[in-house]
């Protein structure tokens, strides 16, 4: 059966390639972005015809979101796959971030994702089926320094998704957290990534080094966005899809190291951890 995909942030990067993969597989797609004309232009090569509904959407605009979801259901009758992809990277050391920068990061990456999920869930529950793909990051698995706002926003998505998966299981709705490593998108380009606005001497050298490293790495990332789009088709088709999907060999390696280090630390401090039980004997 043909599925209808609802994809946010489909103008470029991962969202664009996920939309192209779905359209290439014969699916119908509701592709959203901040400008509908740019979405249509990005997906023009798919020659999707009536299978594509490209529309303007800012995920922080709840009123507009309700209109877009209604239009999607009016057009295609249902929504089967929700891809929460819209977001951006706010890098910079925590003290160098203006409060407004942190709030805007959360307004888009976290509360925007909440808004879209809240708007689509009634349809998925009514169908007693569906699949939510929340695009997190390897930065939602492990911190890597100089990105406190971004990584914490992705950690929030991880916790939200894990709990949501439990809540929605009785309704036949799957949730998968997609954790990409570094993919060859414009994520690190000046048109997308943002850095701290507060100048602090103690961070000056590290900040300059970080910007130079990321700038040099842009366009050379290991991950292929088109291949991720194809991989997500496989996950959506799976009878028992994963709760978490690490995308890219770099993501796999970093996740393995993070889990290994966490187990080492857990075992090292196990006796002290268990000593806090009410019936535990406390050693002097």
Image (cartoon, rainbow, N blue to C red):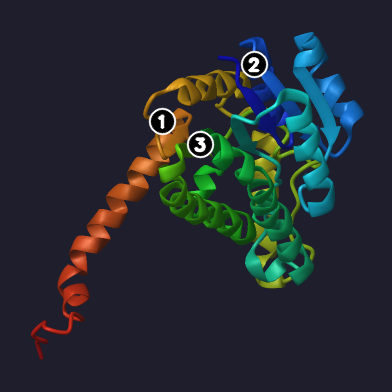
Mark 2 lies on a secondary structure that is loop
Q: Residue 256 is drawn in which quadrant?
A: top left
Crowding near the residue tagged with mark 3, few <14, some 14–19, many ≥20 C-alpha atoms within 10 Å:
some
- Residue ID for mark 3: 128
Figure check: 187 above or below 140: above
Residue 266 seen: yes
Q: Residue 74 is drawn in which quadrant?
A: top right
Seen at 11% across and 87% down, the residue is: 282
Q: Position of residue 163 (x, y in %)?
A: 45, 54
Crowding near the residue tagged with mark 1, few <14, some 14–19, many ≥20 C-alpha atoms within 10 Å:
some
181 sits left or right of 38 in the view: left
Seen at 37% across and 29% down, the residue is: 240
Q: Earlier in the sequence, mark 1 or mark 2?
A: 2
Q: Earlier in the sequence, mark 1 or mark 3?
A: 3
- Residue ID for mark 1: 241
- Residue ID for mark 2: 27
Q: Position of residue 197 (x, y in %)?
A: 79, 64
């Amino acid at each position: 059966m043909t599925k209808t995909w609802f994809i946010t942030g489909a103008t470029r990067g991962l969202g664009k390639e996920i939309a192209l993969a779905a359209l290439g597989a014969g699916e119908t797609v509701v592709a959203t972005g901040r400008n509908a004309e740019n979405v249509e232009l990005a997906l023009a090569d798919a020659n999707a015809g009536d299978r594509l509904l490209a529309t303007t959407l800012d995920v922080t605009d709840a009123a507009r979101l309700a209109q877009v979801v209604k239009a999607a259901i009016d057009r295609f009758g249902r929504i089967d796959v929700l891809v929460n992809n819209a977001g951006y990277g706010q890098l910079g050391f925590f003290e160098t971030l203006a409060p407004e920068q942190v709030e805007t990061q959360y307004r888009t990456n976290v509360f925007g994702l909440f808004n879209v999920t809240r708007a689509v869930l009634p349809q998925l529950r009514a169908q007693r089926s569906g699949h939510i793909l929340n695009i997190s990051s390897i930065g939602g698995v492990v911190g890597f320094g100089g990105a406190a706002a971004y990584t914490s926003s992705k950690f929030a998505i991880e916790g939200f998704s894990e709990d949501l998966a439990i809540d929605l299981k009785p309704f036949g709705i799957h949730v998968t957290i997609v954790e990409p490593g570094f993919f060859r998108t414009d994520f690190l380009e000046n048109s997308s990534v943002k850095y701290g606005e507060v100048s602090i001497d103690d961070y000056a050298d590290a900040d300059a080094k970080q910007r130079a490293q990321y700038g040099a790495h842009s366009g050379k990332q290991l991950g292929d966005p088109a291949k991720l789009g194809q991989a997500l088709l496989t996950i959506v088709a799976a009878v028992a899809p994963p709760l978490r999907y690490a995308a890219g060999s770099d993501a796999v390696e970093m996740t393995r190291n993070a889990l290994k280090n966490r187990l080492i630390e857990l075992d090292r401090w196990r006796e002290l951890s268990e000593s806090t039980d009410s019936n535990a004997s406390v050693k002097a």
